[in-house]
């Protein structure tokens, strides 16, 4: 080996915007001394929260990240959001694979099961050296399909008719009891 220095993997510093870098440096200046303490009181946390414009809970989260981190400014940099409920967290390349296979392999007359479709998605991801999504993730993408279009593609036009409305528009009702609907059950009436 030419040098004994070990390589450190880049952790997003090269792509960190200047504003985010400045914010991380400010956080490191304020949170660093607090992270060195064994116990951080509410007064110190409140002062740091006021200086950073955060809540006390967020300050304690930053202190924990600073203690568990490698001692770098980037430990306190704003991290990318995980997405939240109902939002996708998969990389775009995996989402693209799922979308393409949904169109080519799932929405066909040959009705593949969820397990078989998930295996195909996992194989396609493995072929491109990507991490395969969980089975529930694939099931959620299938559940997000339009039922009318999915039934039409998988079972045909006749099967999808039951999912369609009769058509037309009901007459506009502008006053109470302007339109009354009665059950049409056939009964014997004397």
Image: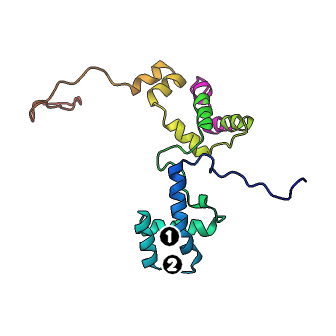
Give 28 or 188, whichever is nearer the viewer.
28
Region rendered in magenta: 102-119
Q: Residue at x 68, y 43 (%)?
A: 131
Count of numbered badges drawn on the protein:
2
- Taking the image as shown, residue 75 lies to the left or right of residue 7, namely left
Q: CA distance from mark 2 to mark 1?
A: 8 Å
Say which mark, if any, is on residue 153.
Answer: none
Residue 60, numbered label: 1
User: Against 134, is 49 above or below?
Assistant: below
Q: Position of residue 123 (x, y in %)?
A: 71, 36
Residue at (63% x, 64% y) in the render? 69
Circle 1: element type: helix
- The residue identified by callout 2 is 40
Relative to residue 26, is residue 146 depicted above or below? above
Q: Main secondary structure of the magenta part?
A: helix
Residue 81 lies, in percent from the top left, at 51, 51
- Which residue lies at the image location 14% right of the left edge and 29% below the top edge? 173
Q: Is residue 113 at all visible to an observer of this figure? A: no
Quarter of the image for residue 180 reads top left
Q: Secondary structure at mark 2?
A: loop
- Mark 2 and mark 1 lie on one chain; the one further toward the N terminus is 2
The C terminus: image quadrant: top left
User: Vertically, is 60 above or below 107?
Assistant: below
**Residue 115 lies in the magenta-colored region:** yes
| Color encoding of the figure | rainbow
Whether tag 2 and tag 1 are in contact, CB under 8 A, the answer is: yes
């Amino acid at each position: 080996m030419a040098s004994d220095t070990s390589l450190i993997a880049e952790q997003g510093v090269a792509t960190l915007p200047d504003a985010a870098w400045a914010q991380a440096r400010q956080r490191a200046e304020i949170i660093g001394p607090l992270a060195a303490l064994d116990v951080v009181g509410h007064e110190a946390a409140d002062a740091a929260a006021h200086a950073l414009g955060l809540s006390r809970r967020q300050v304690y989260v930053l202190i924990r990240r600073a203690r568990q981190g490698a001692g770098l400014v980037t430990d306190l940099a704003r991290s990318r959001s995980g997405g939240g409920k109902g939002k996708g967290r998969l990389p775009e390349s995996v989402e693209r694979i799922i979308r393409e296979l949904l169109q080519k392999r799932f929405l066909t007359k040959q009705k593949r099961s969820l397990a078989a479709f998930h295996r195909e998605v996992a194989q396609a991801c493995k072929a491109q050296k990507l991490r395969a999504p969980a089975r529930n993730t694939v099931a959620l993408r299938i559940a997000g399909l339009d039922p009318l279009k999915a039934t039409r593609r998988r079972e045909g036009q006749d099967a999808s008719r039951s999912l369609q409305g009769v058509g037309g528009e009901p007459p506009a009702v502008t006053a109470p009891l302007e339109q009354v609907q009665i059950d049409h059950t056939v009964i014997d009436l004397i």
